[in-house]
Amino acid sequence: MGTNLKRITVSLLLVVGVVVLISALSSGEPGKDVETVAAFDVPMLVGKDLSGLVAELGIPDNNSEPNMLQIENGTKTWEKSWERGDYFLMATYDVKTRNVIDLFIGAETDAGFVQFRDTKNILKVGGLSSSATGYSVEFVKARNTPGYTGAVIKER
């Protein structure tokens, strides 16, 4: 019985030690000390049609098309999206002309949403500038949490 108690105690101490070590190595609050990097070069994409986006970004991760019934019932726009790490880029385009109407950068994961509490990080993810003359950036405020869900980018 004493040997079993010692084994249990040693195992318990080992588990507690590992948990303490992992906690010490983690950065604490999510999003702290995390460098936001560009996931997309959006300025290079602004002004391209859908085939231009596919040529630059590859086949979309969300690559559906409206069916004939949807088009007959008035669907004029559709979306395609590409994922990069914690983020995604969605293009809204005209179904008939395939011209891109706007782009949206959004967060795909909790880590991405934490970064989107600050508009500067959203700009970094898209390689964007708030003072650029070729496009406009409109930040989309989150409804029930602090920060933003992303940004809409339109050619000027």
Image: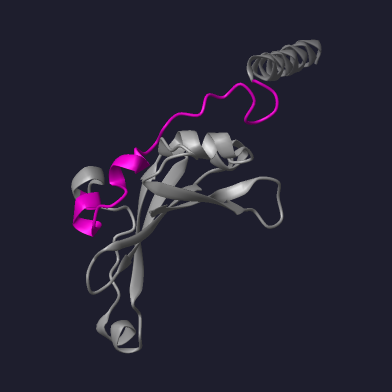
Q: As drawn, which residue projects farthest toward the front?
A: 133
Asked if one can make out residue 85 in the rendered structure from this viewpoint, the answer is no
Q: Is residue 76 magenta?
A: no
Q: Residue at x 74, y 13 (%)?
A: 13
Q: Quadrant of residue 49?
A: bottom left
Q: Quadrant of residue 84?
A: top left
In the depicted structure, whether residue 151 falls above or below residue 75: above
The image's colour scheme reads one colour
Q: Which segment did they paint magenta?
A: 27-54
**Where is residue 29 shown, x and y percent of the image?**
70, 28
User: Magenta stretch mostly in which secondary structure?
Assistant: loop
**Where is residue 126 shown, x and y percent of the image?**
42, 39
Q: Quadrant of residue 125?
A: top left
Q: Residue at x 66, y 16 (%)?
A: 18
Camera-side residue: 76 or 154? Answer: 154
Looking at the rendered structure, the number of numbered marks drawn on it comes to 0
Quick one: quadrant of the C terminus?
A: bottom left
